Image: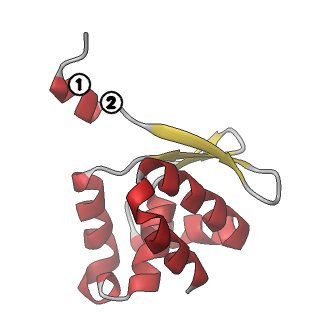
Amino acid sequence: METASEQITRPVTETVTDALGRTIIVRKLRSLDRMKVFELIGAENAKNEPYLGYAVLAYAVTSIDGTALPVPATKIALEAVVKRLDDEGILAVSQAFKKFNPESEDEAQETVKN
């Protein structure tokens, strides 16, 4: 039986397919992950909701078409993931976020629309 600590630290992932047919693995972000995103993008960009939304979605991607992606360590690396995903990939990743957080479905849609 898993302990509460093991449940919290166990990675939760979702696999989605975008409109281009790419298989994307997305991990559920934890509190520390979100803090790291804020640190990477800086205070000003953290206030920019569309930018923050794209950053969070991209930070959660662990693999595209079987190619593992390292956790972005710089803003440039994070933006490279966004570029690689483009609109089709971002939309698919937002679908995974809906499964992780069903109560924030409207927020994810607003992020993608902006």
Residue 23 image offset from top left, x and y in percent: 71, 45
68 relative to 80, above or below: above
Contact between labelled residues 2 and 1, with CB atoms less than 8 Å apart: yes
Q: Is 101 in front, or is 80?
A: 101
Q: Is residue 28 left or right of residue 22?
A: left
Q: Residue furthest right?
A: 20
Q: Taking 82 as reference, is 76 left or right?
A: left
Q: Using a 10 Å C-alpha cutoff, classify the residue at mark 2 as few (fewer than 14 neighbours), some (14 to 19) or many (20 or more).
A: few
Which residue occupies 41% across, 64% down?
104
Decide: is 95 above or below 114: above
Q: Tell whether 97 sits left or right of 2.
A: right
Give residue 43's quadrant in the image: bottom left
Residue type, label 1: Glu
> Callout 2, which amino acid?
Arg
Q: Could you say whether the residue bearing mark 1 is in a helix, strand or loop?
A: helix
In the picture of the structure, the residue carrying the numbered disc 2 is 10
